[in-house]
Image (cartoon, rainbow, N blue to C red):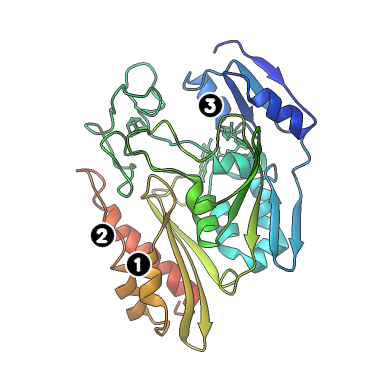
């Protein structure tokens, strides 16, 4: 491991100033960054520890919930307002990692977690455009069972691994940031970027810009939501395919719907084609299956991960069945 400087600012302004230094990286819970330091994937010159900043509040108002960037994944999952008003988010968080990790992991860190692509983490021998722009992509000719099938490019097929972000996407979440150029509010849908020709760019965040909080608007569909995750083990495993679904019902008729996918995209993936096929239709298994069949039409699979196409459609149906009262 290389030497680096360390600062623990108590003020936001100080953190932003330090974060602008060349080679600076923010650290929150450290559950991802410390791994990447040990692997030599991340080589910061300065670590700016955010843990002393006053961002651990979950504030509930009439129009929604405001979640500080340092709220732990455990605290968020167990909060009464999230359990009652945004159950898909609670279920997504609880499906991730282990209790010990969730106690340390923060909302900001989860939003900015990096891919688990084994070649990205293998500094010694594997080429990786995300780690070093223009160096190649070992996954393209390698073993790619866990890799993405939506939003991929010729430069990178790395999967976005977060469960939390899939639920946030379905709940119309907004990410609030503060940086050298002031404050910004970014829809979660626009926060993560596709790899395209620049897999090394992963989000709309600029160098030195901090995520301060996330807001969840109160909607007619969030309380009727669920998260379903298919994985190799019952716990402590990343998604092969997952879905967050939410619907608003008028009797048996679907008034509004949100469907998002995890485990398949280079970023959390919203399925608008599925949502449109649901609206105005009755909440039945047949309608859910017909709508889910429209998902994944743009999938670009490899010889190892073609199974994700059917699996993703099935987790969508399962999540819709839960919220539609069919199960
Ligand atoms: C063994 C293991 C299993 C896991 N399983 C799952 C799983 O099943 N599902 C899942 O979704 N996740 C899983 N995770 C990932 C876990 O959710 C993340 O490691 C965690 O959420 C990162 O949060 P952190 O606070 O520890 O981030 P850190 O490690 O502190 O930081 C992560 C990144 O976020 C940046 N960052 C942090 N906070 C801010 C901020 N406020 N503003 C700007 N940048 C910031 C850091 O600079 C860094 O780049 C797993 C992790 C491990 C180690
Ligand atoms: S898939 Fe992306 S992260 Fe993985 S080796 Fe290729 S460029 Fe790197």
The residues bearing labels 3 and 2 have C-alpha atoms spaced at a distance of 35 Å
**Mark sitting earlier along the chain (3/1):** 3
Q: Quadrant of residue 14?
A: top right
Figure check: 74 above or below 321: above
Is 71 on the left or on the right of 1, as rendered? Answer: right
**Mark sitting earlier along the chain (3/2):** 3
Is 25 on the left or on the right of 199, as rendered? Answer: right
Judged from the image, the secondary structure of the residue bearing numbered disc 1 is: helix
Residue 125 in view of the camera = yes
Q: Nearer the viewer, residue 171 or 252?
A: 171
Figure check: 325 above or below 99: below
Residue 235 in view of the camera = no
Name the residue tied to disc 2. Answer: 297
Q: Which numbered circle lies on residue 35?
A: 3
Q: Quadrant of residue 65?
A: bottom right
Where is residue 204 shown, x and y percent of the image?
51, 41
Name the residue tied to disc 1. Answer: 273
Q: Which numbered circle lies on residue 12?
A: none
Disc 2 crowd, CA 10 A, few/some/many (<14, 14-19, 20+) = few
CB-based contact (under 8 Å), mark 1 and mark 2: yes
Question: Is the residue indicated by label 1 positioned so its CB lies within 8 Å of ligand 1?
Answer: no
Q: For the residues carrying marks 3 and 2, which lies nearer the camera in this image?
A: 2
Judged from the image, the secondary structure of the residue bearing numbered disc 3 is: helix
CB-based contact (under 8 Å), mark 3 and mark 2: no
Disc 1 crowd, CA 10 A, few/some/many (<14, 14-19, 20+) = some
Q: Nearer the viewer, residue 168 or 32?
A: 168
For ligand 2, the image quadrant comes to top left
Q: Nearer the viewer, residue 53 or 143?
A: 53
């Amino acid at each position: 491991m290389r030497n680096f400087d360390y600062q623990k600012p108590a003020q936001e302004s100080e953190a932003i100033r330090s974060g602008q230094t060349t080679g600076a990286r923010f650290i929150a819970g450290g559950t991802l960054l410390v791994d990447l330091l040990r692997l030599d994937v991340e080589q910061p010159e300065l670590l700016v520890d955010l843990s002393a900043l006053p961002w651990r509040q979950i504030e509930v108002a009439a129009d929604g919930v405001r979640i500080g960037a340092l709220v732990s994944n455990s605290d968020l999952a167990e909060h009464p307002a999230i359990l009652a008003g945004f159950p898909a988010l609670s279920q997504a968080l609880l499906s991730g990692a282990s209790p010990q990790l969730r106690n340390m992991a923060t909302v900001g860190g989860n939003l900015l977690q990096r891919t688990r692509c084994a070649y990205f983490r293998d500094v010694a021998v594997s080429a990786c455009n995300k780690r070093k722009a223009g160096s190649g992509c070992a996954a393209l000719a390698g073993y790619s069972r866990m890799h993405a099938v939506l939003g991929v490019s010729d430069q990178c097929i790395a999967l976005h691994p977060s469960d939390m972000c899939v639920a946030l996407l379905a709940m119309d979440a907004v990410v609030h940031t503060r940086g050298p150029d002031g404050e910004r509010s970014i829809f979660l849908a626009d926060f993560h970027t596709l790899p395209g020709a620049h897999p090394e760019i992963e989000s709309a965040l600029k160098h030195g810009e901090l995520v301060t909080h996330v807001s969840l608007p109160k909607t007619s569909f969030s309380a009727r939501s669920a998260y379903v995750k298919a994985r190799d083990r019952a716990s402590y495993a990343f998604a092969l395919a997952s879905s967050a679904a939410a619907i608003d019902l008028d009797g048996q008729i679907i008034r509004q719907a949100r469907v998002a996918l995890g485990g398949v995209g280079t970023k959390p993936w919203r399925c608008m084609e599925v949502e449109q096929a649901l609206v105005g239709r009755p909440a039945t298994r047949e309608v859910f299956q017909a709508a889910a069949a429209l998902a994944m039409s743009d999938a670009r699979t490899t010889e190892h991960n073609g199974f994700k196409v059917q699996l993703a459609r099935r987790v969508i149906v399962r999540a819709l069945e839960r919220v539609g009262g069919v199960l």
